Amino acid sequence: MAIDAIGVPPTATYNTVAQRTIGQEEFLRILLAQLRFQDPLEPVDNREFIAQLAQFSALEINRQQSEKVDTLLTMENANQALSLIGRNVEVGGAGADSAGVGEVTAVTFQGTEPRLTVRTATATLIQVALSSVRLVQE
């Protein structure tokens, strides 16, 4: 998930690495296969079996917390954009030049990503990402 923030250059977008992890169903399939094909004369040690279950439970809790953090970041990103309505901001353009200073008049969303509409003295800039905002003026 890419996160935009005020004052962060557009080239410094932070992405979380999508990693393929084992889900609950895959874990249960592996566990059942392990139990089905174990040697009846040397079954899986109870402590090892409990340790595997505990480890999977911890991984599942970690996954759920990660999803909640992603949701909180999305909400904070939207809150930050909405708090800019009616405020003057400096919007960075291509290169080191400033595209302009103007008032944020609206916020729209592309999926979960907020986009600003900024009215400057000469033009109205639409679909401005939060990462393009360099300065928020009081």
Image (cartoon, rainbow, N blue to C red):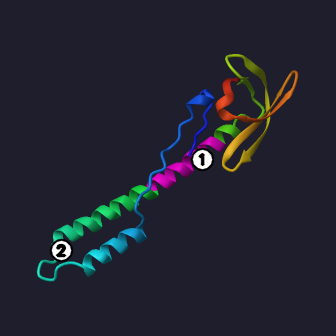
Crowding near pointer 1: few (<14 within 10 Å), some, many (20+)?
Answer: some
Quadrant position of the C terminus in the picture: top right
Q: Secondary structure at mark 2?
A: loop
Dominant SS in magenta:
helix
> Residue at point 68% right, 38% down?
81
Rendering quarter of residue 54: bottom left
Type of the residue with mark 2: Val
Instruction: Decide if residue 115 is on the left or right side of residue 41.
Output: right
Which percent across, then down, holds residue 110?
A: 72, 47
> Residue at point 58% right, 40% down?
3
Up-down: is 21 above or below 99? below
Q: Secondary structure at mark 1?
A: helix
Q: What label does residue 74 carry, if any?
A: 1
* Mark-to-mark CA distance, 1 and 2: 44 Å
Which percent across, then down, holds residue 22?
A: 40, 62
Q: Which residue is mark 2?
A: 44
> Residue at point 27% right, 81% down?
36
Instruction: Decide if residue 47 is on the left or right side of residue 80.
Output: left
Type of the residue with mark 1: Thr
Q: Give, as a single range, the part of the protein colored magenta.
A: 65-78
Which percent across, then down, holds residue 111?
A: 69, 50
**Is residue 71 a member of the stretch shown in magenta?**
yes
Q: Which one is closest to the eye, mark 1 or mark 2? A: 2
